[in-house]
Image (cartoon, helix red, strand yellow):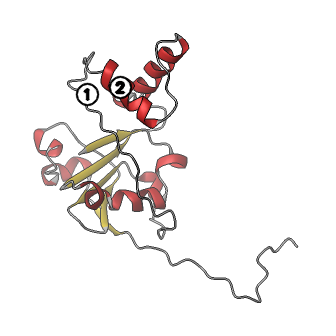
Amino acid sequence: MHEFTDGCAAQYKSRHCFGDISQTCKDFGYSNFTRNFFETAHAKGPQDAAGGLLKRQADIAVLRGRATIQNAFDLYNFAVMNMKQTISVCKRGLFRFVETISRDKSISYKPVLNIRLVHQVVVRDNRDEILIRELSCFSCDKCASHFYEENFSNTGSFTNVNMIVETPTVLDNNENKNPRN
């Protein structure tokens, strides 16, 4: 699975997002997962609009009175009924409704050095580690197939980062929980 997103550090480049990415193969059964970050203010074309297209079409349908969308299942049904035909550079559209997503919101990860310089994150198999580097490459079939070794001269090598879960700090009963009081 290859994913492309903008490089917004506030949204996608936190240690917790990278920790979540490290679990992607386990969570979704992928053998390889790659997230590529575009430069800030770039990627304003079709590759950045996958979710935006669906939301915009749903908004237009609701505004015109052609659809009532009040929850995730309604949005899923709208997509299945109205967006099966491909347009532009899209080759196919797949929609899957997931009733609930089990999330452990309490998981927190230790910091990743130079996280804002990262433009590619790779996860392989069921490991609790990520491979990161400053450049992405998809100019050949090998990179698109997760065989990155041939382009190290152009993109640099990966840095292996073990995503370590942070142990929550427990306050002592005698500690002041709110220092402003």
Quadrant of the snapshot with the N terminus? top left
Left or right side of 93 for 118: right
Residue 157 in view (yes/no): no
* Res 71 label: none
Rendering coords of residue 52 (x, y %): 44, 27
Contact (Cβ within 8 Å) of mark 1 with mark 2: yes
Identify the residue at image location x=25%, y=20%.
89
Q: Where does residue 29 sit, x and y in percent of width and height?
A: 22, 56
Q: Residues within 10 Å of mark 2 (few under 14, many from 20)?
A: some
Which residue: 30% across, 38% down? 96
Compared across the picture, whether 140 is left or right of 95 comes to left
**Residue 147 left/right relative to 48:** left
Task: Give the vertical position of 171 relative to 140 (above or below).
Answer: below
Which residue in the rendered view is the most extreme toward the top?
64
- Residue pointed to by mark 2: 79
As drawn, the label of residue 93 is: 1
Residue drawn 25% across the image and 27% down it: 93
Residue 40 in percent (x, y) is at 48, 37
Give neighbour class at mark 1: few <14, some 14-19, many 20+ (Cα, 10 Å): few
Residue at image point 47% right, 60% down: 16
Q: Position of residue 114 (x, y in %)?
A: 45, 60
Q: CA distance from mark 1 to mark 2?
A: 9 Å
